[in-house]
Image (cartoon, helix red, strand yellow):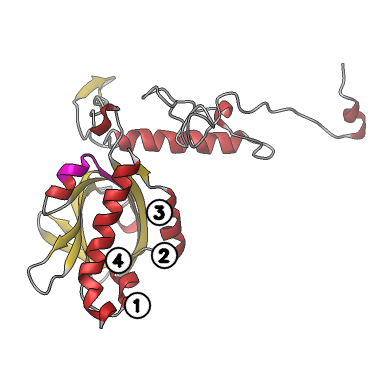
Amino acid sequence: MDNPLWFRKRLAVAHPLGGAPIGRHPGEGVCDPYGEVFGHPGLYVADGAAMPGPVGANPSLTIAAMADRLCDHLLLARGMSGRSPARGGQRRSGGTTQATPAAPARLSGGRTGAAALSFTEEMAGQVTLGEREGPAPLRLRVTVAIQDMDAFLADPRHEATATGWLDCPALGGRLLVARGRVELMVTESAGGRRRMRYRLPFTDDRGRRLLLSGHKELRAGPPTAIWPDTTTLHAKVLADGVTLGAGTLKLGRRDFLRELTTIRAGSPGALERFGTFFLGSLWQVYRPRLTS
């Protein structure tokens, strides 16, 4: 039977959504913001059933974007790269070599793939790759994960893992970062300064294995210095220890607000302990000026 609206040259189409919706906790939905079903690690919902409500017409692109985001998160959480496996092995198929997914590590809390605490940071800026080429835009997005909060706090380097991507047209576009390392609030011997160090390996479009090495430096200063010190990354692009380029990346205010929404803690205690550590480190650096 024809839809009566057809005679007015209009079309009405229903798009059922929901059924296994995204929520902030099991009492609100079936899966988390990345589509992973609560209480069932490794089980994902990647279609319109995950939509928590109407998303406009036509919702197919929204659903596709959500599924794409889910897949990126799943691959990065397992440390997989599009060019070579971070863990696991390789298999031959049709004359080509393909990465075989490695089994996800069992981390703190007994849940597969869950870290004690994680957050996603996104910075943008420029790097100069040689005098002739000039400055090139570079955007970096990494998820920093602390697997064991006790070990993290006891380690003087306060090391965490980092996975994600960097996007630089001069190096070949968007390139995956796997098995990166970030050291948070490392105490320097001189003047009680703190440093946050980044070591992010990646492979460019020419097959070169490169390293983005950077640091944020926190030193005693006025309270207004806290923001630029904690949001400015002084970076170098290295190949076998040789500097190919250098520049500065910055965390914008919108990116900072977005970063706050990405914080995931295995328990309220983990978030509290990390907050005490991070804010306490800031206090140790800037206290002389704040109390003078």
Please state if 232 lies on the left or on the right of 57 as rendered: left
Q: Which residue is mark 4?
A: 230
SS class, disc 2 = loop
SS class, disc 1 = helix
Circle 1 packing at 10 Å, graded few (<14), some (14-19), many (20+), is few
Q: Where are the magenta residues, as a range?
A: 143-151
| Residue type at numbered disc 4 | Thr
Q: Are marks 4 and 2 in contact (CB under 8 Å)?
A: no
| Residue type at numbered disc 2 | Gly
Q: Nearer the viewer, mark 4 or mark 2?
A: 4
Please state if 107 lies on the left or on the right of 228 as rendered: left
Task: Choose top left, top right, bottom left or bottom right for residue 170.
Answer: bottom left
Q: CA distance from mark 1 to mark 2?
A: 16 Å
> Could you say which disc has been placed on residue 224 in the image?
1
Residue 37 sits above or below residue 72 on the image: above
- Residue 206 drawn at (x, y percent): 24, 48
| Residue type at numbered disc 3 | Glu
SS class, disc 3 = helix
> Could you say which disc has been placed on residue 252 in the image?
2
- First of labels 1, 2 by sequence position: 1
Please state if 259 lies on the left or on the right of 19 as rendered: left
Q: Which residue is mark 3?
A: 259
Position of the N terminus by quadrant = top right
